[in-house]
Amino acid sequence: MISKSKLKNLIDELKNYRANATVLLSLYIPPEYPISKVMQQLVEEYGTADNIKTKKTRQDVKSAISRAMEALKNYRKTPENGLVIFSGNVSNDPGKDDVRIWVIEPPEPVTVRIYRTEKYFITGPLEEILENRDVYGIVIVEKDQATIGLLSGKRLILLEELTAQVPGKTRAGGQSARRYERLREQAVHEFFKRLGEHLKDAFLPYIEKNRLKGIIIGGPAYAKEDFLAGDYIDYRLRDRIIGLVDTSYQGEYGLREVLERSESILKEHEYIIERRLVEDFIRRVVTGDNKVAYGRNEIERAIEWGAIDVLLISEDNPEIERFKVLGNEYGFDVFVVSKETEEGQRFKSFGGLGAILRFPISGQN
């Protein structure tokens, strides 16, 4: 079992790896989940990988899955806190392969089950173990697809995407149409039941630890209403629903859309505060507002003048602590901007250091 200090160092290492295609495998297995079922899924995913058109991508995905299967052969059952595996080709040189694998027995139980191949490793659930923060659950519901996610601090984590084969609506009339509609309703019913079970797997562990602050449900109005009207949601989860929002998208973009439309629900949450501050900062820069500063020289001068109201600093800036000390001394707030959010990436394009001012400083560039 890995210690929390070693886990933090490992997460920092994993977050540095990036691939040109979705070939980096992240596998999370919660406690008591059968290894045999995971192996069965990996075998199926290995076969599905044959359909990948690009030869190099196909080879890399199959290599990542093979290494994971080899690692799982060492386990008769899932360890008491679950198991996390990362594997893939992490080489930056297109002409060379560097397929690595990390097998982690976490210091606290894994609360999610994930199989995903991306251009990066999914480290969010492990970071949750280190931070032990309150979280919000997010669900996007349609009649043939769904997305399940978590909001923890300023980090938005996509846990799972589900799809179903639901027949489309028919224009035919008579008994055939009624029969067809019954089949369609049954397919939707089965999908909603499956989604309800996945929500229990995703969110109940956070309720048991008293960390789930609430659940927000997004999606088209008719789908949300039908899902809520049926007996699909565990009563413990239903009690945590704090808002419904109309949205149009699924996946990571859909999760961001849910949060954008949930400002009134989450107005005091770090993610919303960060988005507002960064948007305000960028708007001021773009419009030529003279109550904004960015760049090291302007910031240092603004501090000396006592002109800073809020200092924004990217989380990978090594001088965060120094600026916090200066904030206490000169009476301004310091807000650390995540490098993982869309807003954080936009802020980085301005150097990752900026400020909203109380008053203009003379001689600004």
Image: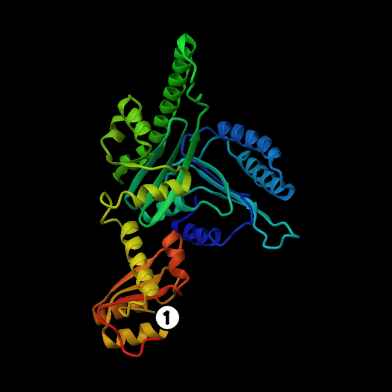
Q: Position of residue 64 (x, y in %)?
A: 65, 47
Furthest toward the top, the residue is: 175
Q: Nearer the viewer, residue 84 or 309?
A: 309
Q: Quadrant of residue 354?
A: bottom left
Residue in the picture at 38% in, 43% down: 247
Residue in the picture at 30% in, 88% down: 304
Q: Position of residue 133 (x, y in %)?
A: 34, 53
Q: Nearer the viewer, residue 25 or 258?
A: 258
Under circle 1, the secondary element is: loop
Q: How is the image coloured?
A: rainbow
| Residue type pointed to by label 1 | Gly
Furthest toward the bottom, the residue is: 363
Residue in the picture at 62% in, 44% down: 68
Q: Is residue 56 above or below residue 47?
A: below
Circle 1 is placed at which residue position?
295
Residue 107 appears in view: no
Residue 177 appears in view: yes
* Image label count: 1
Q: Position of residue 21 (x, y in %)?
A: 63, 52
In the drawing, does residue 299 fall left or right of residue 120? Answer: left
Q: Position of residue 197 (x, y in %)?
A: 41, 30
Quadrant containing the C terminus in the rendered view: bottom left
Q: Nearer the viewer, residue 301 or 157?
A: 301
Residue in the picture at 37% in, 47% down: 258
In the drawing, does residue 268 fall left or right of residue 355? Answer: left
Q: Residues within 10 Å of mark 1 (few under 14, many from 20)?
A: few
Q: Quadrant of residue 222?
A: top left
